[in-house]
């Protein structure tokens, strides 16, 4: 992002959310503002890592006095997310101005794959805070295994939110064990179900958008990440 203003953050707390995902809470710089669903370019403030920026979505609400992220680590990549998982309170990170990502266009179905859930966390939390209920909203969330489901208990407890969890690499589970494909979507959505928010790995987004259109969902009902 051109002319981005860097901000230095101090880590206040880091807690595990799943076996490979952490919830990080940072002090919020004065005057910093963002919208639910927006992301920032994030780097570790230490030698050798300051130029290794990665996009992460804010999971706290804009009016909170902290900045929070839920970040999945990939130790096999030997990179930034593995380093983030090792952060301790008092450590520093550098972020730029917030940008793009997914905007709340209204009620609908939120379809996420793995760490693609993160833009929806703040959007659903804010909608719940403002409306008192998520009536008319559904979350379809795919993961590799049941233990990978981020914030499952929070989503299940959100008033009015219908949740559909599915896993693709576990034969027996307490949730569905199917890939989100056209037949899966046909079973769980209707083309008039408001907006359809899609976030996850790029190939998954492309496939689901194509499947939604083939099921009669109009282009302007589909909301995906905007990187502009």
Image (cartoon, helix red, strand yellow):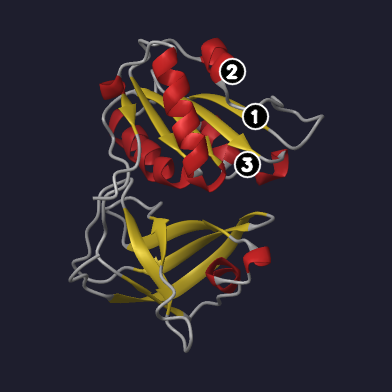
Q: Secondary structure at mark 3?
A: loop
Residue 136 screen position, x and y as percent: 38, 18
In the rendered image, which residue does mark 2 sit on?
Answer: 184
Residue 216 screen position, x and y as percent: 38, 10
Q: Secondary structure at mark 1?
A: strand
Q: Marks 1 and 3: in contact by CB < 8 Å?
A: no
The numbered mark at residue 149 is 3
Q: Secondary structure at mark 2?
A: helix
**Image quadrant assignment for residue 222:** top left
Question: Spatial distance from mark 2 to mark 1, Cα to Cα?
Answer: 10 Å
Q: Is residue 23 above or below residue 110?
A: below
Residue closer to the observer: 40 or 137: 40
Mark 1 Cα shell of 10 Å, populated few (<14), some (14-19), many (≥20): many
Residue at the spot x=62%, y=61% of the render? 74
Residue 131 appears left or right of 185 = left
Q: Is residue 187 above or below residue 102?
A: above
Of callouts 2 and 1, which one flags the residue occurring earlier in the amino acid sequence? 1
Q: Marks 1 and 2: in contact by CB < 8 Å?
A: yes
Question: Spatial distance from mark 3 to mark 1, Cα to Cα?
Answer: 9 Å
In the rendered image, which residue does mark 1 sit on?
Answer: 166
Residue at the spot x=64%, y=27% of the render? 179
Residue at the spot x=60%, y=69% of the render? 82
């Amino acid at each position: 992002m051109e002319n981005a203003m860097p901000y230095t953050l101090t880590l206040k707390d880091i807690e595990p959310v799943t076996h490979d995902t952490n919830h990080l809470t940072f002090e919020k710089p004065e005057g910093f503002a963002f919208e639910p669903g927006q992301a920032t370019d994030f780097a570790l403030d230490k030698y050798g890592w300051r130029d290794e920026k990665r996009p992460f979505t804010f999971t706290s609400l804009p009016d909170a006095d902290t900045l929070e992220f839920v970040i999945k680590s990939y130790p096999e990549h030997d990179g930034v997310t593995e380093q983030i998982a090792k952060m301790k309170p008092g450590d520093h990170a550098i972020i730029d101005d917030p940008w793009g990502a997914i905007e709340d266009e209204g009620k609908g179905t939120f379809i996420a794959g793995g760490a693609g859930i993160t833009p929806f966390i703040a959007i659903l939390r804010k909608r719940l805070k403002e409306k008192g209920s998520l009536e008319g909203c559904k979350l379809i969330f795919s993961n590799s295994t049941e233990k990978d489901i981020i914030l499952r208990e929070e989503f299940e407890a959100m008033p009015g939110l219908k949740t559909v969890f599915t896993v693709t690499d576990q034969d027996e589970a307490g949730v569905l064990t199917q890939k989100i494909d056209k037949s899966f979507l046909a079973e769980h959505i209707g083309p008039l179900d408001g907006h359809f928010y899609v976030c996850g790995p790029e190939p998954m987004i492309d496939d689901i958008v194509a499947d939604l259109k083939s099921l009669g969902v109009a282009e302007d009902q589909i909301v995906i990440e905007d990187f502009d």
